[in-house]
Amino acid sequence: MIAKKDLLSECLAEVLSKKFPTYDVVIHERDEAVTKDVESCATLVLLYRLPFEDITAVLQRLKIKNSDTSVGIVVESISKLECQLATLAESREIAGVLPANLRLDVFVAAVELLVKGGEHFPSALLHLLSSEPPSPADAALDGPLVATARPAQGATATGDTSALTTREVQILDLICDGRQNKIIADRLGLSENTVKVHIRNIYKKMKVRNRTEAASHFFGTGRSAATARQN
């Protein structure tokens, strides 16, 4: 965690330490020097209630040090930073946004998802990415976990999964499980660059812009049915 060391951040670190006993949970002040070893081996970096200019500075540093580290941002309110966070989410610079007003069990579940390589974005950001206003029913989902498995409203406006090849369906299925490109490549015996090419083709065929939209549409149109069709 990169955060101001206060009661709230230290309590959160204690909770996460108990939830993830095999991981070291450490708080670094935002101006504190972080060793290269920490940055190179960190599974997840949580930016806890930092000003946006500090967020961008940390992201730039992590991009140079270790592109495989997942980054989650804990914010006081989605509305205050909505457009800026949406830009970061769409560019894949972050893996998730966690509002500070989530219930503790939901917050911990979201962190666990990020640790496993998945994503977590509140519905307000998902709708901002799709340029659609959230409905009252979707607004009620901001408390529970909203992740890649959540079908997005308006998914029928995207492309048809029937156009995907067998290999593309295999890759999309692993994306829905929150797998990173390196893991997908190892699982399917491909190079990481080949996986990236397949993912770009998936986005083009499905008419989506990112993993969140692709996974949401895949779930919305019937993941099991598409997989069975390719088999």
Image: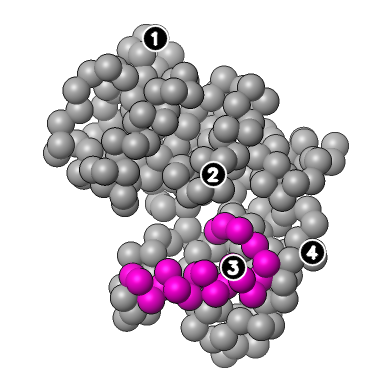
Query: Horizontal and vertical percent for residue 140?
Result: 77, 35
First in residue order: circle 1 vs circle 3: 1
Instruction: State yes or no: discs 4 and 3 in contact (Cβ < 8 Å).
Output: no
First in residue order: circle 2 vs circle 3: 2
Residue at the top extreme?
Answer: 6
Amino acid marked by disc 3: Tyr
| Label 3 sits on residue | 203
Instruction: State yes or no: discs 4 and 1 in contact (Cβ < 8 Å).
Output: no
Query: Horizontal and vertical percent for residue 6?
Result: 37, 9
Label 4: element kind: helix
| Label 4 sits on residue | 157
| Label 1 sits on residue | 7
Kindly report the distance in space between the C-alpha atoms of the residues bearing marks 4 and 2: 21 Å
Which portion, as a residue range, is magenta?
192-211
First in residue order: circle 4 vs circle 1: 1
Amino acid marked by disc 1: Leu
**Above/below status of 81 relative to 179:** above
**Above/below status of 73 relative to 109:** above
Kindly report the distance in space between the C-alpha atoms of the residues bearing marks 4 and 3: 13 Å
Q: Is residue 75 visible?
A: yes
Q: How crowded is mark 2: few (under 14 residues within 10 Å), some or many (20 or more)?
A: many
Residue found at x 29% / y 36%: 61
Lateral position of residue 135 relative to residue 129, left or right = right
Q: Residue 203 magenta-drawn?
A: yes
First in residue order: circle 4 vs circle 2: 2
Residue at the bottom extreme?
Answer: 231
Residue found at x 40% / y 60%: 180
Residue at the right extreme?
Answer: 136
